[in-house]
Image (tube, rainbow, N blue to C red):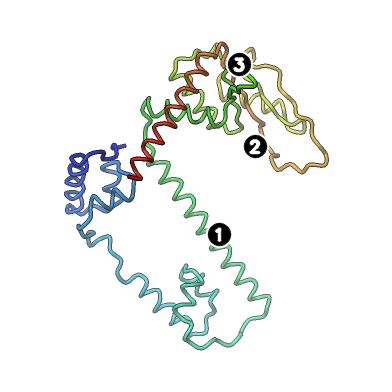
Amino acid sequence: MAPAPGTHADFEELRKRAVALRRAGLSLRQIRDELKVFNNDILNQLVRGEPPPEWTKRPRAKDDLRAKARELRLRGWTYDQIEVELGCSRSSVSLWVRDLPRPERRRTPEEAAAVARKGWEERLRLRDEDRRRTKEEARRAIGGLSPRELFLLGVGLYWAEGGKDKPYDRRENVAFVNSDPGMIEVFLAWLDLLEVARDRLRFTVMIHETADVKAAERYWADLVGATPASFSKTAIKKHNPKTIRKNTGENYRGCLVVKVLKGADLYRRIEGSWCGIVEAARETDQQNRT
């Protein structure tokens, strides 16, 4: 990722490149990917005054939809039918056709309910597709991680989810607990970055007694690539019959505890690094306010 322009010279150099790409016919998204500038405010400043290329413009998209919506309304279509047909929101359809006469009711209540259900299912489908597309774009935008980025990420990850020392309870050891396998994988990659040998790690599965304990133990062992000797006895949580649990099913595998033996020095480095991150964030925030 390109560094945020910290000086006037940095900004002007980025702007020259952005303007050249804009004039070459690239869209904002293409310029963003080329320059690795993912802050929308900065990106817009870089191309300020440069018109978008013709191929990105959609001058009559809404006008065409509005005309089609009015045509369908005059043919007796309901709001629900127009929404499904055009893929527009109900508020847009209402704005476009509210001055036209209301069509006579031609469906039974059951038919109307079926149409409404179909429209809702289509909206859910579009919403899921939009959700999937947004996540995929965000995933691709990350790219690779530098050692420094992984180090900072690991410190923040541990301070959010790991055990911490308290003035009233001195515990300078490293213990990380999570049910998300991705979090566990990132934490182990971070330990590898810090050259913490895998033979210094001990694992413990924590899980409800009503779950498939053996399957969970096999899952976590395969994920971390550890031998049974690296695992302590599984911690079984007794089930309260008065409590309705939602974390059930074949994908429920409890939590995994990752402990680092002889981790006092590592813990102190984590805490000190976190304090440094907080101070740097304060300084950056103060600079942004002035």
Quadrant of the rendered image containing residue 229? top right
Q: In the rendered view, tell whether residue 91 sits above or below residue 208.
A: below
| Mark 1 or mark 3: whose residue is earlier in sequence | 1
Tag 1 residue? 124
* Disc 1 residue crowd, few under 14, some 14–19, many 20+, Cα 10 Å: few
Farthest residue, direction right: 241
Instruction: Name the kind of residue labelled 1 in the image.
Output: Leu
Q: Amino acid at mark 2?
A: Asn
Q: Looking at the image, tell me whether mark 3 or mark 2 is earlier in sequence order.
A: 3
Q: Are marks 1 and 3 in contact (CB under 8 Å)?
A: no
Query: Percent x, y for residue 211?
Result: 73, 33
Residue at left offset 60%, top offset 16%? 202
**Vertically, is 162 above or below 136?**
above
- Residue 126 locus on image (x, y percent): 50, 59
Check residue 202 in the rendering and tell me which mark sits there, or answer none. Answer: 3
**Distance Cα–Cα, label 2 vs label 1:** 24 Å
Identify which residue is drawn at 22% across, 43% down: 11
Q: Position of residue 239 (x, y in %)?
A: 79, 34
Between marks 3 and 2, how big is the CA–CA gap? 23 Å
Q: Which type of secondary structure does the marked residue at label 1 adopt?
A: helix
User: Whole-Å distance between the Cαs marked 1 and 3?
Assistant: 44 Å
Residue wearing tag 2: 251
- Residue type for callout 3: Arg
Q: Earlier in the sequence, mark 2 or mark 1?
A: 1
Residue appearing at x 53%, y 75% in the figure: 81
| Mark linked to residue 76 | none
> 75 above or below 87?
below
Along the line of sight, the residue nearer the viewer: 69 or 98: 98
Secondary structure beneath disc 2? loop
